């Protein structure tokens, strides 16, 4: 995964600058469509702190220049611009094997050899897949798209550890992204037919006369209604309705198997009929509990740890009247009073993705092989494509315990240490830096160590259970799309400071880097790597 | 009920009744008695560990991977241990090893991840609890503040039974922890709940690191395999700390869908050698009498072997309880090998929370009400302690 310097995966904010005019036009049109806001609130510019808060919550930490651009916009213009920039497809090229789903039979091998080969392939591809998503998160022009894709991945939690097909996990991810800020009703329908989900929650085993209730339970408890809004009998009936929703094993695609579908009458949530799975999805979407349950979850992701019940009901009503289109909901939520309240800033614990991707993006680290960062996410408790169970990752304060907090601090401490990086062999002038903001360098030792750890980590519970018990690290294949095990990163604090706008005094530095006043760092910070490290190790850096 | 209330209750009761000696000592500090949980990651095959060797059905179910009768280490005329557990036989002879059989729960879940979550949180099959069962125990009866932590997960990774609530640390090695904890800094004012949480964790990590004596040493020699090294870290923590209520160690992967014979043999040997090292080290520290080792995992494995020389996910299982104060023997009723569930699994005869109830009530002296609150229901304890 080596890049030519001009194709650094760290996004250039210059792109944003170039596109500003066009986007402002879009934004002004969008805000013109919302006269209510204009009446309610004079369209004044957000200013630095509000722009920072908006970007901080909706992207993976923002760079100073981005914040200053948004600072000139009104709240509505800023939100509309973020929503207008969302995408339906990833921009980073996926691993080649994603192009085609195929069952590999390997008839020439013995059964044991075949199993070993399958496991090895699964581990390799699993890491390539994680690496690809990290690369996309690092390089995307629309971080909000990735944040929403991750939100749905956590909502419709599915783990490769059970699915055991990187290809099906990739396809699900593509689907989640395509609907990430689209229509929830359509997304729910897609997910209920998603092969990875059908494997993960045993839908493929759900047949007439021998129903498997796993998906039926979770689709109501975790994906739509929330606990307490359905009965055990509803679960049994929903399971019957979904019988026959199966997989074509050769194509890796959804297949309805009429022969094992129970087409009898069912009574679900008070309605009776010869319902099938699609009908169940319709019934679930008719329940106000569904919108309220998901709005509360989005609130905890974007607004504050404790959803405001009244506001949630209002937003849920807006969402239902918008036919579950996600953008109008997000617009209303991000423009709600609660979102902007000063006491709701810096109160949410960053997820490991927020922390790692945010640090790399905000400081414009040069990253060549993102694989080590995928492994770091796992160490910090957010192994992409492998949430701990169908409930997803425990979010909020639960992200942090002594282990994960120390691991985060250990990571940040290393990230902001000059001795972890090799000095640039090209002495970049300021002009060169501006044209090509991220240099590329290598740190072989660290990569070697991380690779080792990556393999060790992959060997634990679930991913590989090699017959014979022991894991021989040396026998595992190297990972990385191109076998180039050079997970390199580089960052020059001097260059970073040099690139900051003239307004970047010390106060502005911590206003940019932290979501609130530092808890421990003094405000007299040296404009050096050590100064930034101090900020990154401040408890406030863990919050957004 | 907080810890003070609990002690007050015990104190007032002591005036009226003669309490068992255990509860009296518990009133001083129940957590002088150490609990070491050993997770058999990936789900150990109980039928080839605690073997019903004289049951004809066993040989029928396990034609190729069954342990041959003449290799079984006989415990009784019905049951015996896998030969790799030979290092545990001296403990069996001394009555320090109990095998608790038939453990499981209703409506078993056969997913590793969900089922270990059930065991870790002490929940029903259908309930999702966020706190570990030991976290709830420590919330009910708090270990002394002077302890280095309530619980320590050795080997890194998830906090398992300590998750979300306990003053819990995860330590891969004492050296690494002491190095990392240098970055912990609890000073400063928390302006919101999330910051309070962070500063509390920083404080816990820092005080734990300050309370660990980096110079504590043990003469015990530990096995060089991964589990032996985990046990070494665990024992170093015990030696170096002013106290800890519970430790969690683990080994694996026992997920032997294929090639089970070799894989399980190697792991069970590690397990046995590690437990022997725990006995040696706690004996060296004068603590074997107040140490109990309890094995656990998410489920047992399918009664009938599969086509790959292995076993698939199952349900009921046997676990071991070991220690100087343990009343050894076979506890519980082994599930029938012929009356299997519809999907070919053993039917559990004892709720796994009975094992937890024994630890809470009989090891730590919790009242019935406290145990019930922690476990969300009444579970009879297993007579495990002398």
Image (tube, coloured by chain):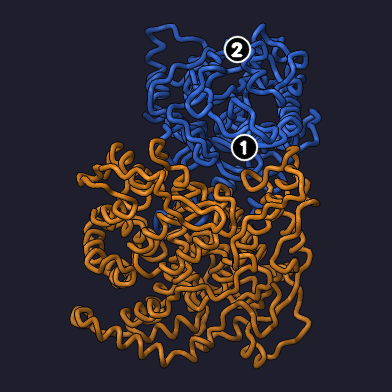
Chain colours: A orange, B blue
**Residue at point 45% right, 64% down?**
A176
Please state if B73 lies on the left or on the right of A127 as rendered: right
The residue that appears at 36% across and 29% down in the rendered structure is B1
- Numbered disc 2: what chain? B
Q: Residue at x 22, y 63 (%)?
A: A317
Q: Is residue A32 visible?
A: yes
**Element on which disc 2 rests:** strand
Residue A339: quadrant of the picture = bottom left
Q: Position of residue B306 (x, y in %)?
A: 64, 32
What chain does mark 1 sit on?
Answer: B
Q: Quadrant of the N terminus of chain A?
A: bottom right
**Numbered badge on residue B330:** 2
Chain-order first, disc 2 or disc 1 = 1
* Side (left or right) of A488 relative to B372: right
Residue pointed to by mark 1: B42
> In the depicted view, which residue is nearer to us: A197 or A144?
A197
Point out the frontmost of discs 2 and 1: 1
Tell me how far mark 2 sits from mark 1, CA to CA.
24 Å
Residue A538 appears left or right of A325: right
Same subunit, tags 2 and 1: yes
Q: Residue at x 67, y 33 (%)?
A: B310
Residue A98 location, x and y as percent? 60, 65
Q: Quadrant of the C terminus of chain A?
A: bottom left
Q: Is residue A474 left or right of B356 when viewed as pictured? A: right
Q: Is residue A396 above or below residue A90?
A: above
What's the mark number on residue A383? none
């Amino acid at each position: 995964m080596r890049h030519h310097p001009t194709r650094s995966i760290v996004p250039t904010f210059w792109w944003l600058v170039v596109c500003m005019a066009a986007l402002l036009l879009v934004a002004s049109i969008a805000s013109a469509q919302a006269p209510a806001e204009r009446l309610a609130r004079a369209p004044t510019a957000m200013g630095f702190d509000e722009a920072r808060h908006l970007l901080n919550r909706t992207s993976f930490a923002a760079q100073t220049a981005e914040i200053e651009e948004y600072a000139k916009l009104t709240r509505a213009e800023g939100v509309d611009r973020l929503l207008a920039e969302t995408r339906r497809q990833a921009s980073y090229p996926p691993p080649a094997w994603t192009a085609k789903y195929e069952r590999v039979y390997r008839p020439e091998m013995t059964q044991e050899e075949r199993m070993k080969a399958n496991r090895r392939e699964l581990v390799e591809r699993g890491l390539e897949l994680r690496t690809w998503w990290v690369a996309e998160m690092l390089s995307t022009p629309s971080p909000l798209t990735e944040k929403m894709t991750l939100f749905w991945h956590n909502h419709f939690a599915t783990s490769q550890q059970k699915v055991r097909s990187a290809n099906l996990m990739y396809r699900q991810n593509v689907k989640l992204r395509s609907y990430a800020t689209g229509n929830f009703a359509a997304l729910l329908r897609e997910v209920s037919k998603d092969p990875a989900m059908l494997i993960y929650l045993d839908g493929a085993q759900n047949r007439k006369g021998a129903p498997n209730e796993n998906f039926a339970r979770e689709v109501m408890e975790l994906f739509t209604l929330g606990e307490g809004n359905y009965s055990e009998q509803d679960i049994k009936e929903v399971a019957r309705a979904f019988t026959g929703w199966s997989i074509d094993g050769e194509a890796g695609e959804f297949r309805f198997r009429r022969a094992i579908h129970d087409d009898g009458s069912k009574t679900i949530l008070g309605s009776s009929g010869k319902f099938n799975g699609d009908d169940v999805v319709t019934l679930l979407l008719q329940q106000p509990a569904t919108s309220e349950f998901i709005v509360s979850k989005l609130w905890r992701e974007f607004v504050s740890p404790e959803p405001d019940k009244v506001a949630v009901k209002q937003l849920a009503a807006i969402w239902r009247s918008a036919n579950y289109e996600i953008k109008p909901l997000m617009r209303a939520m991000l423009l709600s009073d609660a979102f902007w309240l000063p006491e709701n800033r810096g109160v949410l614990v960053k997820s490991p993705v927020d922390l790692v991707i945010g640090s790399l993006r905000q400081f414009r680290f040069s990253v060549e092989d993102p694989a080590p960062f995928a492994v770091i996410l796992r160490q910090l408790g957010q192994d992409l494509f492998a949430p701990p169970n169908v409930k997803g990752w425990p979010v909020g304060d639960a992200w942090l315990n002594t282990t994960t907090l120390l691991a985060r601090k250990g990571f940040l401490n290393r990230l902001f240490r000059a001795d972890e990086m090799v000095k640039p062999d090209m002495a970049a002038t300021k002009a060169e830096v501006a044209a090509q903001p991220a240099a590329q360098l290598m740190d072989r030792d660290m990569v070697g160590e991380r690779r080792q750890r990556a393999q060790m980590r992959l060997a634990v519970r679930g991913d590989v259970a090699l017959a014979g018990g022991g894991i021989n690290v040396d026998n595992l294949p190297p990972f990385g799309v191109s076998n180039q095990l050079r997970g390199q990163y580089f960052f020059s604090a001097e260059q970073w400071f040099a690139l900051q706008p003239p307004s970047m005094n010390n106060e502005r530095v911590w206003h940019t880097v932290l979501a609130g006043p530092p808890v421990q760092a003094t405000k007299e910070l040296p404009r050096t790597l050590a100064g930034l490290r101090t900020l990154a190790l401040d408890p406030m850096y863990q919050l957004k | 009920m907080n810890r003070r209330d609990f002690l007050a209750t015990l104190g007032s009761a002591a005036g009226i009744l003669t309490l068992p000696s255990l509860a009296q000592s518990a009133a001083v500090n129940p957590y002088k008695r150490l609990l070491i949980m050993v997770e058999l990651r990936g789900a150990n095959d109980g039928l080839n560990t605690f073997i019903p060797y004289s049951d004809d059905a066993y040989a029928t179910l396990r034609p190729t991977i069954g342990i041959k009768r003449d290799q079984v280490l006989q415990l009784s005329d019905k049951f015996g241990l896998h030969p790799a557990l030979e290092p545990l036989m001296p403990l069996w002879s001394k009555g320090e090893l109990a095998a608790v059989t038939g453990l499981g729960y209703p409506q078993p879940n056969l997913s590793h991840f969900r089922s270990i979550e059930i065991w870790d949180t002490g929940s029903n099959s259908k309930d999702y609890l966020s706190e570990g069962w030991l976290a709830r125990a420590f919330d009910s009866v708090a270990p002394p503040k002077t302890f280095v932590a309530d619980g320590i997960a050795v080997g890194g990774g998830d906090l398992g039974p300590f998750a979300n609530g306990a003053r819990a640390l995860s330590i891969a090695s004492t050296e690494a922890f002491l190095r990392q904890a240098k970055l912990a800094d609890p000073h400063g004012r928390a302006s919101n709940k999330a910051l309070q949480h962070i500063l509390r964790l920083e404080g816990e990590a820092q005080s734990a690191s300050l309370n660990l004596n980096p110079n504590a040493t043990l003469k015990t020699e530990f096995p060089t395999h991964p589990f032996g090294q985990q046990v070494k870290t665990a024992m170093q923590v015990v030696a170096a700390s002013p106290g800890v209520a519970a430790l969690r160690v683990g080994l694996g992967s026992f997920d032997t869908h294929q090639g089970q014979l070799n894989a399980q043999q190697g792991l069970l040997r590690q397990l046995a050698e590690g437990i022997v090292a725990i006995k040696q080290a706690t004996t060296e520290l004068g603590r074997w009498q107040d140490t109990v080792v309890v094995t656990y995992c998410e489920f047992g494995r399918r009664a009938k072997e599969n086509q790959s020389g292995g076993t698939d996910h199952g349900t009921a299982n046997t676990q071991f309880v070991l220690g100087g104060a343990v009343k050894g023997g076979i506890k519980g009723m082994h599930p029938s090998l012929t009356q299997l569930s519809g999907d070919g699994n053993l039917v559990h005869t004892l709720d796994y929370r009975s094992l937890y109830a024994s630890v809470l009530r009989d090891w730590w002296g919790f009242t019935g009400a406290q145990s019930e609150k922690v476990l969300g229901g009444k579970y009879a304890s297993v007579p495990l302690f002398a």
